[in-house]
């Protein structure tokens, strides 16, 4: 039996994915800082496991391509080491998955520890009596395992935004839309109007940004994919392109994908697709989140985009960094979600 491990209830993880919570419970204030980049995952597995069918199953789940990115990118950058190699700086990585095949274990399961050798750190242990038992377990629960690691990355990003914020942008959002939001340092305020706030983060070879806009809600027909695209095009037209008269639009070539979900009891509509520039040659991925603001009767949209033509295929972390900001948005506590 593994010492000091708490069972990981993967079924509950789905519900927790969209709940803002403290994912890390630091055991010591004297711990080392964890190593590695966001969305890197160290897998600790023996050679027979890694080169066998179980290793194939792990790679198919952990390195599965993310949809709606211009180039193929995996869920995680997987770094594999043997149990003998799991020491020193490797053991201080931010995300670790240990794979243990032990015939004395009665059934396959996943356990979790936080901040074991460094902080913040997530350490998962996938254990079972045989490789086949673990293959079967991954077939049933692999997607939820992925979600748990993504939750850990999200909570780190939210904690950073809360600690190192941009008060000017946060105040503009509060003033115009009445919601609290945490925006990490590095963003600049590019537009500030009562119904449209635009913030962007410029890198030498990339750009990520978000817009928040609001408009009257007239009925359920406003929440169809076509209506959301039309509203998006009206507002992102205010984001100028590189040449005179050019502006952002939703790509007419690729139909966006729509889904609904709840975050802390509030219903949201997600629209994910690609954007282009009318009158020029630019484009990239976007995702928008729309909900009904009960206090104003308006639809509230948080819309994110990435432009990184010289960084293929490194758009995953830029998009995730924007997506995490949704979890910093808080409507007034007196406003009931419907």
Image (cartoon, rainbow, N blue to C red):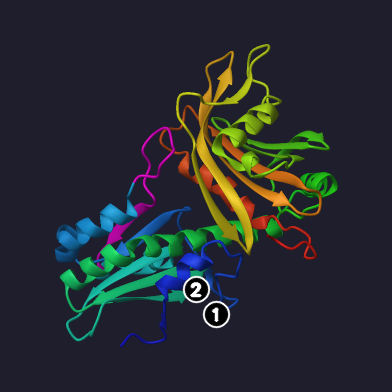
CA–CA distance in space, label 2 to label 1: 6 Å
- Which class describes the residues within 10 Å of circle 1: few (<14), some (14-19), or many (20+)? few
Residue to which mark 1 is pinned:
27
Query: Label 1's element?
Result: loop
Q: Is residue 75 magenta?
A: yes
Give the number of the disc on residue 116.
none
Disc 2 + disc 1, Cβ < 8 Å: yes
- Which class describes the residues within 10 Å of circle 2: few (<14), some (14-19), or many (20+)? many
- For residue 210, what is the image quadrant? top right
- For residue 106, what is the image quadrant? bottom left
Q: Which residues are magenta?
A: 65-82
Left or right, residue 169 beside residue 28: right
Left or right, residue 58 beside residue 303: left
Residue 261 visible in the current orientation? yes
Q: Quadrant of the N terminus?
A: bottom left
- For residue 208, what is the image quadrant? top right
Query: Label 2's element?
Result: loop
Q: Residue at x 40, y 83 (%)?
A: 5
Q: Is residue 116 magenta?
A: no
Residue to which mark 2 is pinned:
115
């Amino acid at each position: 039996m593994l010492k000091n491990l708490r069972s990981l209830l993967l079924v509950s993880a789905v519900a927790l994915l969209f709940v803002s919570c403290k994912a890390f419970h630091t055991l010591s204030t004297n711990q080392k800082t964890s190593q590695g980049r966001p969305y890197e995952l160290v897998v600790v597995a023996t050679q027979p496991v890694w080169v066998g069918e179980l290793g194939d199953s792990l790679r198919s789940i952990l390195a599965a391509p993310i949809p709606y990115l211009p180039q193929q990118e995996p869920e995680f950058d997987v770094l594999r080491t043997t149990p003998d190699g799991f020491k020193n700086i490797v053991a201080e990585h931010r995300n670790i998955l240990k794979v243990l095949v032990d015939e004395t274990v009665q059934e396959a399961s996943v356990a979790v520890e936080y901040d074991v050798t460094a902080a913040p750190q997530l350490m998962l242990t996938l254990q079972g009596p045989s490789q086949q038992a673990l293959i079967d377990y991954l077939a049933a629960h692999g997607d939820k395992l992925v979600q748990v690691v993504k939750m850990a990355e999200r909570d780190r990003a939210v904690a950073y935004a809360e600690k190192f914020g941009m008060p000017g942008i946060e105040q503009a959002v509060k003033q115009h839309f009445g919601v609290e939001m945490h925006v990490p340092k590095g963003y600049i305020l590019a537009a500030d109007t009562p119904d449209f706030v635009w913030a962007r983060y410029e890198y030498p070879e990339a750009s990520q940004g978000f817009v928040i806009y609001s408009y009257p809600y007239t009925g359920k027909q406003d929440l169809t994919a076509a209506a959301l695209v039309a509203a998006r095009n009206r507002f992102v037209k205010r984001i100028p392109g590189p040449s005179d008269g050019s502006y952002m639009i939703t790509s007419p070539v690729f139909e966006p994908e729509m889904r609904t979900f709840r975050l802390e009891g509030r219903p949201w509509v997600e629209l994910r697709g690609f954007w282009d520039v009318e009158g020029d040659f630019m484009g990239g991925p976007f995702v928008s989140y729309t909900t009904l603001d009960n206090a104003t009767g308006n639809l509230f949209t948080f819309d994110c985009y990435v432009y990184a033509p010289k960084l293929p295929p490194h758009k995953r972390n830029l998009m995730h960094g924007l997506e995490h900001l949704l979890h910093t948005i808080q409507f007034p506590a007196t406003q009931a979600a419907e």
